[in-house]
């Protein structure tokens, strides 16, 4: 990885001002995109989904906890796994009580949903010290219907609004050849109006990073995300498990 060029203070100011113009243009474009996103149509969720929670069986409407909006993070946790996905774990580590409070102040709830049994989710949640609502879909249709679980045998053969054949044509054959079913990360936003639930937005893959977190701040630095780093010698397995799997 190369380091930035060394220049004089005047040259640095000139370069910074030139780049500032691009940043302002990108900010305006992002604002326009956010406004357009808010104007996207929504679709009513008519299927009755059921989840296992700490207090028993709950519905999708229950996940709102009485608020108008709900953000669901599709956390990769295969029913056969004993531990949660390292990348999903790293991202969830950054969800603070203050973050949740700020959402709730704006009438928005946040919840995690995975296919693994509730007892596995509760164990991993306790190990990580999280206090975030986490529910098991128990391999029901929820994660499949909302694009987070791939299983062509059940008719779920697309991810991030592309078919597995399209991924294969793009050179990403593993999306099609990997053993199914398998999970992918994602985030889905819901709105409830008088007890009716609507899906307003879903995003996956690199789009998940656009909401902020450590990647956003790393993008502001000279060394960026440092994805081509070499693992330090002597790193323990427990420490290694805390490192995001960038390939996923």
Image (spheres, rainbow, N blue to C red):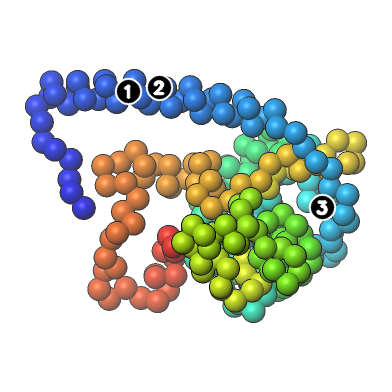
Mark number displayed over residue 77? none
Q: Residue at x 80, y 41 (%)?
A: 43
Mark 1, residues whose alpha carbon is within 10 Å: few (<14), some, or many (≥20)? Answer: few
Whether residues under marks 2 and 1 lie with C-beta atoms below 8 angstroms apart, the answer is: yes
User: Which element is circle 1 on?
Assistant: helix
Residue 193 seen in render: yes
Q: Give the residue at mark 1.
A: 20
x, y percentage for residue 195? 90, 41
Between circles 2 and 3, the one closer to the viewer is 2
Mark 3, residues whose alpha carbon is within 10 Å: few (<14), some, or many (≥20)? Answer: some
Q: Quadrant of residue 178?
A: bottom right
Between circles 3 and 1, the one closer to the viewer is 1
N-terminal of the pair, mark 2 or mark 3, is 2
Q: Is residue 121 left or right of residue 85?
A: right
N-terminal of the pair, mark 3 or mark 1, is 1
Front one among 110 and 143: 143
Q: Is residue 97 left or right of residue 113?
A: left
Q: Residue at x 63, y 27 (%)?
A: 36
């Amino acid at each position: 990885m190369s380091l930035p060029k060394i220049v004089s203070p005047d040259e640095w100011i000139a370069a910074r001002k030139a780049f500032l113009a691009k940043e302002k243009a990108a900010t305006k474009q992002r604002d326009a995109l956010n406004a357009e996103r808010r104007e996207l149509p929504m679709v009513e969720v008519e299927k009755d989904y059921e989840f296992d929670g700490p207090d028993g069986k709950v519905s999708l409407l229950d996940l709102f906890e009485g608020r108008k909006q709900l953000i669901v993070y599709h956390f990769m946790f295969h029913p056969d796994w004993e531990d949660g996905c390292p990348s999903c774990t790293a991202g969830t580590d950054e969800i603070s009580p203050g973050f949740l409070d700020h959402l709730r102040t704006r009438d928005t709830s946040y919840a995690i949903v995975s296919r693994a049994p509730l007892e596995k989710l509760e164990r991993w949640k306790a190990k990580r010290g999280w206090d975030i609502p986490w529910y098991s879909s128990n391999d029901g249709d929820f994660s499949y219907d909302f694009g987070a679980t791939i299983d062509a045998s059940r008719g779920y053969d697309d991810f991030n609004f592309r078919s597995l054949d399209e991924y294969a044509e793009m050179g990403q054959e593993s999306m099609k050849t990997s053993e199914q079913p398998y999970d992918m990360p994602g985030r889905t936003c819901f709105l409830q109006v008088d007890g009716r639930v609507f899906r307003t937005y879903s995003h996956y893959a690199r789009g998940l990073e656009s909401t902020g977190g450590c990647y956003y701040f790393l993008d502001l630095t000279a060394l960026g995300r440092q994805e081509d780093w070499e693992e330090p010698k002597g790193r323990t397995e427990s420490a290694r498990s805390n490192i995001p799997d960038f390939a996923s």
